[in-house]
Image (tube, rainbow, N blue to C red):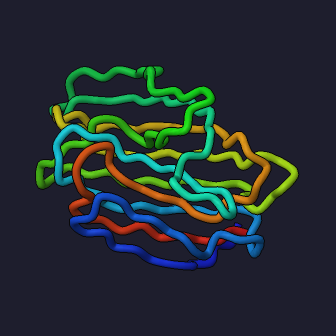
Amino acid sequence: MPKTLISTHTPSGVGTLDITSGINSTYPAYAFHYYNCHPATNQVDFMFQVNADGESGFNETVTSSFYYTQGYESGTGGTSYYATMDLANQTGYIPLNYEVGSDADQSTSGVLWLFNPSSTVFQTHFLSESNFAQSDNYAAAAYVGGYFHTTDAITQISFKFDSGNIDAGTIKMFGVN
């Protein structure tokens, strides 16, 4: 699957990063690679939401499922969770991970895929996997999937932590053939 870089964003000290152009019918899928997104606030979730064409407020109705696994930094312990962060017919932001820490060595990196967001026949599905360092010194990986309850084209996306600012990071948007 060839990828074409559409835009690069480096949020620093902002509450949200809204990407309001570039998602259109040019590509059947879009990949958002986020690197070392670091929160200003400790123990927060990195999240996203979208707008359908002509809409505002980043509040599309969504159904999603969230799963994560973790291992302690020292190499001891390790568990997997089917977390209660699933959304069913909700309009809030969708968590991509869980309790990211704000220490200098803690952040989140991952990929979020939007499949066929320009379709006006079918709902837009998404899939994400990320790695992150939790506030209590666990290395963790999260897997999220779901769909938006609209057949309107998705044209905008927003990223944020559930509290505080995005202190640093890079988010790249790719079109995928």
Residue 175 or residue 93, whichever sits in front: 93
Q: Is residue 7 found left or right of 71 in the rendered image?
A: right
Q: Quadrant of the C terminus?
A: bottom right
Q: Is residue 124 found left or right of 165 in the rendered image?
A: right
- For residue 25, what is the image quadrant? bottom right
Residue 17 or residue 176, whichever sits in front: 17
Which residue lies at the image location 54% right of the left edge and 46% below the top edge?
59
Question: Residue 75, percent across and down?
Answer: 21, 30
Which residue lies at the image location 44% right of the left edge and 39% below the top edge?
95
Question: Residue 88, percent across and down?
Answer: 60, 26
Which residue lies at the image location 36% right of the left edge and 47% below the top edge?
46
Q: Is residue 120 found left or right of 175 in the rendered image?
A: right
Which residue lies at the image location 36% right of the left edge and 68% below the top edge?
170
Residue 97 or residue 54, whichever sits in front: 54
- For residue 85, what is the image quadrant? top left
* Placement of 120 over or under 71, stated as above or below: below
